[in-house]
Image (cartoon, grey):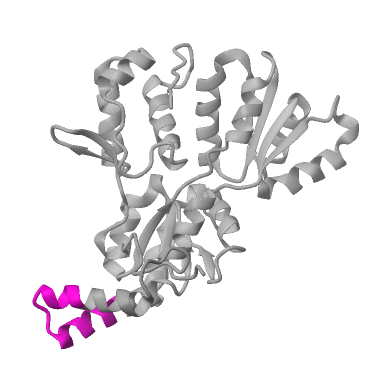
Amino acid sequence: MRFHIQQESDIPASTQLYNQICFAIAARHYPPGHRLPSTRQLAMQTGLHRNTISKVYRQLEIDGVVEAIAGSGIYVRDNVTKKDFKKSFYSKNNINNPPDQEAKKAIDNLISLGCTLQETRKILTKEIDWRIKCGARILVSTPREDIGASMLIAEDLSPKINVPVEVVPMEELEKVLCNSNNGTIVTSRYFLQPLEKVAKKHGVRAIAVDLSDFQKELKILKELKSGSCVGIVSISPGLLRAAEVIIHSMRGSELMLMTAISDNNGRLLALLNASSHIVCDGPSLSVIENTLLKNRSQLMRLPQIICAQNYLSIDTINQLKKEIGVIN
């Protein structure tokens, strides 16, 4: 993936690069464990000073998105801990040995490490109980100021995961877990680090989900004529900020760009009146359609609406289903 910095933009170059790297990681252009380009490579690609790139990498490390390995480079952090068992004992769709043989192998491995049968039973029972506890519900959590991001995640997960899905602001998560400390905390990679601390305190798990790469929507925007006005509408302020940086880095000043939270009626109406194309998330679509219907006489033309059907990638939903044990 190439990064583009618009030097004439009002958005600081470091912010542009930070947001583009975060999007690349969240959309799995750079999967967990992937080595990021060196500061020298990014400097050649973007025209930024290596010190600026180093500061961006340090901020990404502070935010828990990447990790620096001395003498090796900067890598996308893998949020899966040993306890999370990235691979299950077996998969019904990809199985080499019957489940009882796989279970026997696991027991033999523990015994070879010096565990008694009683200790082995205790270890396996504890792990199974912990997994059942984590699979009891999904707690989708982001900061209250961007609770719309949680709502988008929950909307994608609810129809596909046969467990209760609750939206909980980060500021209220401690209270919720104190009342009932079970479930799996789900968030985006932007907010994983603070939620991992909360999860560890309450004996549950925190998992980051990956965003859709939005290739269909970005392809349409790449092909728009220069001078087109594009509106971005979402229930998530964070998604709007990221979209603004990504689109601006991709097209620069060639496109006029407006953004609006879907419940801001005045700004939404102005956006609908000015834009030839509108990109929105699923929850915003009905709001846009109702606003167009009510204000048709005030609009010079009807914009083309492009609704992003998925906020999360299909792979990340399937992986989450495996993690909480609800996949067939």
Residue placed most toward the observer, 320 or 184 = 320
Relative to 84, is 289 above or below? above
Residue sticking out furthest to the right: 297
In the image, residue 227 sits, relative to residue 79, either above or below, namely: above
| Quadrant in the rendering for residue 300 | top right
Q: Height in image: 118 above or below 85?
A: below
Name the one closer to the observer, 130 or 261. Answer: 130
Q: Residue 259 at what x, y percent from top left?
A: 62, 32
Q: Is residue 136 left or right of residue 225?
A: left
Q: Closer to the camera, 230 or 295?
A: 230
Q: Quadrant of residue 20?
A: top left
* 286 sits to left or right of 298: left
What residue lies at 44% left-to-right and 64% top-to-bottom?
A: 322
Membership of 122 in magenta stretch: yes
Percent from the top left, x then y, of residue 17? 39, 26
Q: What secondary structure predominates along the stretch shown in magenta?
A: helix
Q: Which residues are magenta?
A: 108-127
Considering only vertical position in the picture, is 77 above or below 279? below
| Residue 151 in view of the camera | yes
Picture coordinates of residue 166 (x, y %)? 52, 65
Name the residue: 26% across, 25% down. Answer: 38
Instruction: Give whichever of 126, 226 is nearer the camera.
Output: 126
Percent across and percent down for residue 183 are: 42, 70
Q: Is residue 140 visible?
A: no
Residue 87 is covered by the magenta coloring:
no
